[in-house]
Amino acid sequence: MRGESWLASERRLRRRHDGGASGRSSETPPSDLGLEATALLRELGAGRVPRLVLIHGAEPLLVDELAAQIAAAVLTDPAAAAWNREVLQADTVTGDALVTAGRALPLFGQRRLLLVRGLAEAPAKALDRLRDAIAGARAAPGGWPADGTVIVLLAPGADRKSPALRVLPPADQVEVKAPAPRALPGWLRGRAREAGLDLAPAAAEALVELVGDDLSRLAGELEKAAVFVGPDGRVGVEVVRALAGESRVRRYWELGQALEAADRARALAVLAELLDADEEPTVLLGQIVGHLRDVWRVKSALAEGEDPREVAPLRRGRPAFAVERVMAREEAVAGRELADGIRHGFDVELRLKTRGGEAAALLTLLVAELARG
């Protein structure tokens, strides 16, 4: 069909293939990225690259990786790649500038790649201007972009209601879908195979359990594991727990250190990292309240003329210098402030258990209060 986009053609063929009494297909798509992304990958594998496409999805990692695969298909000559790759930002480029850039011809090569980043963050009015400019350029004689030029618009994080998805018609869009939670271990194992690693099923499950469903963090932990494995490339549970578990323990330790040092900025930054890693809010609260209890025990021991370094709840598992840090914090905290902090902690616990507030906001306010100098 003349003028039909590659994606519209793919959808038309799939509807024809899926037709029948049930209206369903018994085929399983060969990728976890969604049918549209899978269709694009097939096109790239066959040497066909769309001239204009908008890629969006909730996971920035997957959007960027699909864009990288397009770039690899377009810029096949490394010597000419630097001359034929241009990046624009959606919030600053004008419609006229984008149209002009799309009409440029490749230099020292057969194809040219133009990336437009940041569509999801650009103002709606700027996106509308880009949409109108693109529509006008495509309707002009000769079409747009120029032969040999491929334009990829990127909108990671954009949902279906985002103004970013109005820039191009749906037939020119690809949604990259993250794997379902239950499919994450399989996704990890496939990614490991591509990197030449043998990730055991139990190790993949352990990694998801320790890190959560953040794909960027999961991919990062897999890259760390690749450094420590032997020549056989096998990644077992022990490697995963040693690396991912160590990172988690280290962040909890840093949170305690920041609270003891009354370093509010650092404490809030570490708390944000833990929340982003989907740590259980009640576990985080336990860590924070545990710091308060240690300070309270130090204050009580000193009031009774005891050496806090000999108090059993503090001494267990903590060296003397660690207790001394708590002692230093105790000197800066008045008894009333400490009591208010403990009451605040109990109030946060009650609200967490009764869904009386958003967990991240409650914990952030509590840490900001406790870590003030």
Image: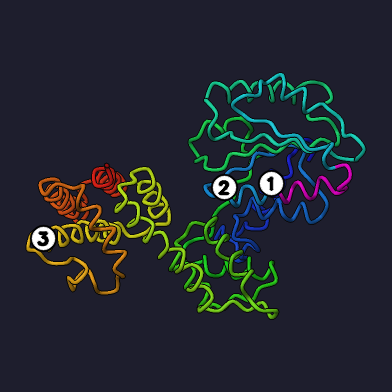
For the point 42% across and 62% down, the residue is: 250
Q: What type of secondary structure mainly makes up the magenta span?
A: helix
| Residue farthest to the right, as pictured | 108
Q: Was residue 68 drawn as part of the magenta stretch in this picture? A: yes
- The residue at the point 78 percent across, 56 percent down is 45
Q: Mark 3: which amino acid?
A: Ser
Q: Secondary structure beneath disc 1? A: helix
Give the percent coordinates (x, y) of residue 348. Answer: 19, 51
Q: Which residues make up the magenta segment?
A: 67-80
Q: Position of residue 312 (x, y in %)?
A: 18, 73
Kindly identify which residue carries mark 1: 67
SS at mark 2 in the image: helix
What mark, if any, has residue 60 been given in the picture?
Answer: 2
Q: Is residue 248 left or right of residue 364?
A: right
According to the picture, the residue beneath numbered tag 3 turns out to be: 300
Quadrant of the rendering where the N terminus is positioned: top right
Q: Quadrant of the C terminus?
A: top left
Residue at mark 1 to residue at mark 2: CA–CA distance? 11 Å
Q: Nearer the viewer, mark 2 or mark 3?
A: 3
Task: Classify 263 as above or below 236.
Answer: above
Specify whether residue 118 is painted magenta: no
Q: Is residue 311 left or right of residue 173?
A: left
Q: Nearer the viewer, residue 171 or 306?
A: 306
Mark before the other along the chain sequence, 3 or 1:
1
Seen from the viewer's position, the closer of residues 311 and 213 is: 311
